[in-house]
Image: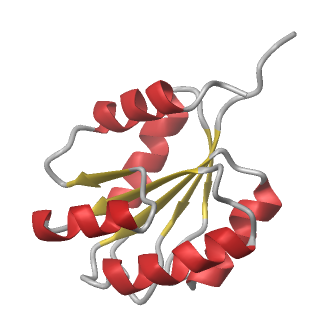
Amino acid sequence: MTKRPLRVLIAKPGLDGHDVGAKIVTRFLMENGCEVIYTGLRKSPKEIAVAARDEDVDVIGLSILSGSHLPLCRQFRDLRKQYQLEDKLWLVGGNIPARDQEELKKLGVDAVFTIKNSLQSIVEFINQKKSWA
């Protein structure tokens, strides 16, 4: 039996209009065997939760550069529960200050990747935490 590729949703919540990093992560994940759904810019937390549910993804990655990571992730945490996405690996990346990373993890974020992390570290984390379906 062949395993299906790991499905990853990459999303840009809020009003942040900078998506180069999200597109680079998307491409890198694809090159490493993942099937990636990129939602595009300016999605609401609800749109992201619905897409994650409808696409039956294994991993949800939020790319946030706007500085609104805490309120957006608080909203998404509630929607994650409402849409029964709590078993999905939840990653947040972008320009996230060190002082906010622990709070994000308290909200349920599995890992925070900043501009200092390598792309390979994202793939390695996903592979350690999530078995290929």
Is residue 44 or residue 87 the one in the foreground?
87
Residue situated furthest top in the rendering: 1
Q: Quadrant of residue 51?
A: bottom right
- Does 85 sit left or right of 12 as displayed? right
| Residue at 47% in and 34% down | 126
- Look at the image and tell me whether residue 26 can be seen: yes
Residue 9 drawn at (x, y percent): 60, 55
Seen at 72% across and 75% down, the residue is 82
Vertical placement of residue 72 versus 124, above or below: below
Q: Is residue 54 above or below residue 17?
A: above
Name the colour scheme: secondary structure
Q: Quadrant of the N terminus?
A: top right
Residue 20 visible within the image:
no
- Where does the image place residue 127, in percent across and percent down from the top left? 48, 26
Residue drawn at (51%, 84%) of the image: 75
Residue 35 x %, y %: 65, 39
Rendered-image quadrant of the C terminus:
top right
> Would you say 128 lies left or right of 44 here?
left
Q: How many marks?
A: 0
Give whichever of 115, 60 is nearer the camera.
60
